[in-house]
Image (cartoon, rainbow, N blue to C red):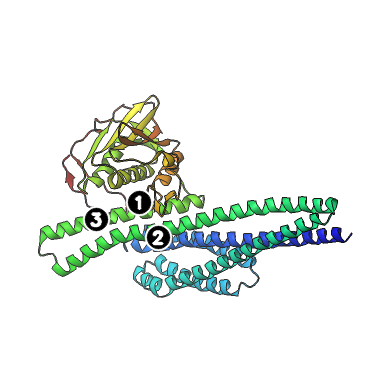
Amino acid sequence: MIGLLASLAVVYTNADGVAKVVADAAAQQQAEAALGALSVARAALGQILLVAPSDTETTSDLAAEADDLLTELLNRVTALEASLGDATAVASARLSAQDATEAYLALAGEGDLSNAARLATTQLGPALDHLTTVIAVERDRKATAIAAARAEVGRLATASRFLVALGIPGATALAWLLLARRRRRRLALSEALEHERELNRSKDQMIANISHELRTPLTGIYGAARAMEESGLTDPRLAGELTGMIVDQSAELTRMVDDLLVTARADAGRLRFEVTRVAVADEARAVVSEFRRSGKPIHLDCAPALVFADPLRLRQVLRNLLSNAVRYGGNHVSVIGRLTDDAYEVAVVDDGPGVGRDVADRLFTRFVHTGDRPLITGSVGLGLAITRLLVEGMEGTVSYSRVEEYSRFAVRLRADPSVGAGLPPGGHDQPIKASTAAGQGSREPMCSW
């Protein structure tokens, strides 16, 4: 009888511990989700300041996007507060961040970007930093509580084995079965928490990558602007070179921001496609012209055809693949497009070293790392994952292969049955005007290819 009561006491204690772990795990997951939403909201808020003051329509759209992300962030933080015993610190930080963000969006909505930038530096940034710190403290506190509970489970298991040794096999066996079931549940919960921690570490690494990647074009833009400020416009040749540097670096910066916005919209379920008939060879030439300004030769050989695609998304796909090939491929990069049955395949090929077989199947997923470096960074560590997302959204496919010492990224899209009718033979290298994407400046020099 004493042994049975002791076994029941052990089972009750363990069940109570499991309930606490579940509650702490839920709070930790809510904190992780709030931190993720906070990172996305900060990126959207910061992008407003990159828009030209005269572009009020784009500023208004970005402000509306940021307002939606702010609402999602506040909902997640509120959910976190409900799971905490004492949420005073989180609530206070949330209110401060909410007030600063609403004031910032009001200024941006009025087109007063100068005061918005000043508010972002003096109030909004510190408020968001404080909210991040408070949430991270609560997350780490719950992680510590979970670790302590796991240690307690070990002690309870030892007590159960001792009861079995005392000779109460029936009652102790029942208790042991219950303990084993709860242990399996706790193991599954621990694995889920470890997955969440790994995801959080990947996000932290991505944020570090973003900071590093954004610093490079911003430094170039700032340096060129300072040089123009100091030398004036007395030297037209120098002024032209500096202006070209600013345009090129701004285009690279815009590609990074585009990747972040696509990720945020996809996670929020707001990614939309405007699929229409597109002259794919023209789009490929326009994108290639942007990259040829860097001085790296890119061979273009695309047969004229019409495909069903979103022209803006198609250009973003080609930019991501070309950016990856130019930055990490070999010295010879080609863009080749051909009709195959009822589909059109456009491939970006380079003679670089490629990637190992162990990671080739994971190239198009987010946050794939080797050690402390992303395997394929694209623009900010999301390029290839976003490429697959956009291509599949246009009902196409994207693949990677290694053929005869060449790395090949191929995109297949549906071709129009009337393809070829009335299309110009403009798929091969020929003189055209370089096209610029929205938000990448208006410089359109003639490029002789």
Residue named by callout 2? 208
> In the picture, residue 26 is in which quadrant?
bottom right
Residue at x-position 38% and y-position 44%: 313
Relative depth, front residue between 252 and 282:
252
Q: Nearer the viewer, residue 272 or 55?
A: 272
> What whole-number distance in Å separates the C-alpha atoms at marks 3 and 2?
25 Å
How many marks do you count on the picture?
Answer: 3
Tag 2: amino acid: Ala
Query: Is the C-beta separation of discs 2 and 1 under 8 Å?
Result: no
Q: Position of residue 36 (x, y in %)?
A: 50, 59
Q: Position of residue 67 (x, y in %)?
A: 48, 62
Label number found at residue 247: 3
User: Pointer 1: what residue?
Assistant: 379
Q: Quadrant of residue 341?
A: top left
Task: Please name the residue shown 29% across and 28% down the image.
Answer: 422
**Element class at badge 2:** helix
Residue 140 at x, y percent in the picture: 56, 66
Judge by depth and name the residue closer to the eye, 366 or 4.
Answer: 4
**Quick one: 444 or 290, which is closer to the camera?**
290
Cα–Cα span, label 1 and label 3: 17 Å
Q: Which comes before the other along the chain, label 2 or label 1?
A: 2
Relative to 442, is 371 on the left or the right? right
Categorize mark 2 by other alpha carbons within 10 Å: few (<14), some (14-19), many (20+). few
Q: Of discs 1 and 3, which sits in the foreground?
A: 1
Residue at image location 30% in from the left, 46% down from the top? 328
Q: Between disc 3 and disc 2, whose residue precedes?
A: 2
- Expressed as whole percent of the image width and height from the top left, the position of residue 59 reads 38, 60
Tell me the kind of residue under disc 3: Val
Q: Are marks 1 and 3 in contact (CB under 8 Å)?
A: no
Tell me the tag on residue 345. Answer: none
| Screen quadrant of the C terminus | top left
Residue 273 visible in the shown view: no
